[in-house]
Image: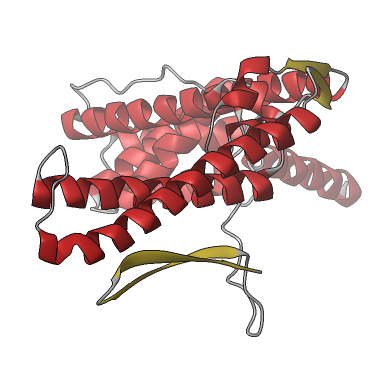
Amino acid sequence: MRTLIATTLLLVAATSGAAAADPSIDLARARDAFQRGDCESAVPLFKDLLYPRPSLTDAGELAEAHVVLGICHHRTGAGEEAEREFTEALQFDLEITIDPGIDKEASERLEEVKRRYKKKLEDEEEKRELAEERDALKRALANMVVIEKRPYYVNFIPFGAGQFQNGDSGWGLFFSASQGVTGATSVILWSYQVLKYGFPIEPPREDFSHVRRVQEIQVVTGIACLGLMGAGIIHALMNYQPTVQRKADESLLPDHLRDKPAPRKPAAKPGTSPASILLFPTADAQGAAVQLTWRF
């Protein structure tokens, strides 16, 4: 008889333990505490259901538990915890709402969290789609070859245009700078004479010597400019290729699909310096000139 009673008691205890461990029963107790307005009792009950790992498996119940826990946090002034719970709820039900009759302020706060959350999802989806489109185009570019046609007339444009078209940036910079300096010097000196003595240029007798030296520099720099233009044309024609084959690169992609520009290159180390052109204006009692120096 005692054995039978002990066995019966063990079965009752096991049944009670299983009932106590049933998440549905715990959820009902948490709901009841909340409906009574007893958030102090409801909060630990909902936390036990959700953390550290949720014991609920139904998405609707999980969303409800997070929202109700968020309402309790909101009522106790824990704003950050309330928004966190609302955000967790939206992961299970994106359209969940709070009846304004239950808590108007919490309902408005949930809607604000929902707007931000949806905007975040939209931004992430847009970034994902852009990344997929960019990757697809990059794979296409990797197997693509571009045939670049180069117009012939560009070889006859001064200031290094032909060199730049041919990819000779160094020579393009040289011809551009040297032609610009010599041509500008010649024009400036001619303009100086016209402004001072009128056109046609008729200086007074006492200025003949000075004007002659200025005109000599003007003529020399003008001839030098024309000679450099001719040399530039010849150089461009010698290296001209009507078509060039190159690998496709990101320059063919739309702007919004290109990768961000690479960071700026670090400054040159001490003791080194990039190639550059230095212009030094000089003047004396005999006239004016410009000195051109090409530094490597």
Position of 166 compared to 254: left or right?
Answer: right
Give the answer, above or below, for where 170 lies relative to 126. below
Residue 250 pos. (x, y %): 68, 29
Q: Position of residue 248 (x, y in %)?
A: 78, 24
Q: Which residue is rendered at x = 24% and y = 65% of the image?
A: 209
**Residue 101's quadrant in the figure?**
top left
Q: For this rendering, which residue is in front, 19 or 76?
A: 76
Is residue 103 placed above or below 126 in the rendered structure?
below
Regarding residue 55, the answer to whether it shows in the image is no
Residue 293: image location, x then y, percent: 54, 68
Q: Say left or right for 248 vs 199.
A: right
Residue found farthest to the front: 205
Instruction: Look at 80% across and 23% down and name the residue there.
Output: 241
Colour scheme of this structure image?
A: secondary structure
Vertical position of residue 156 compared to residue 278: above or below: above
The answer to whether residue 216 is above or below residue 256 is below
Q: Residue at x 66, y 40 (%)?
A: 231
Q: Residue furthest bottom?
A: 271
Q: Quadrant of residue 19?
A: top right
Q: Quadrant of the C terminus?
A: bottom right
Residue 73 visible, this angle:
yes
The image position of residue 216, as x and y in percent, is 38, 56
The image shows a total of numbered marks equal to: 0
At x 15%, y 63%, the residue is 207
Of 234 and 43, the residue lying toward us: 234
Front in this rendered view, residue 207 or 133:
207
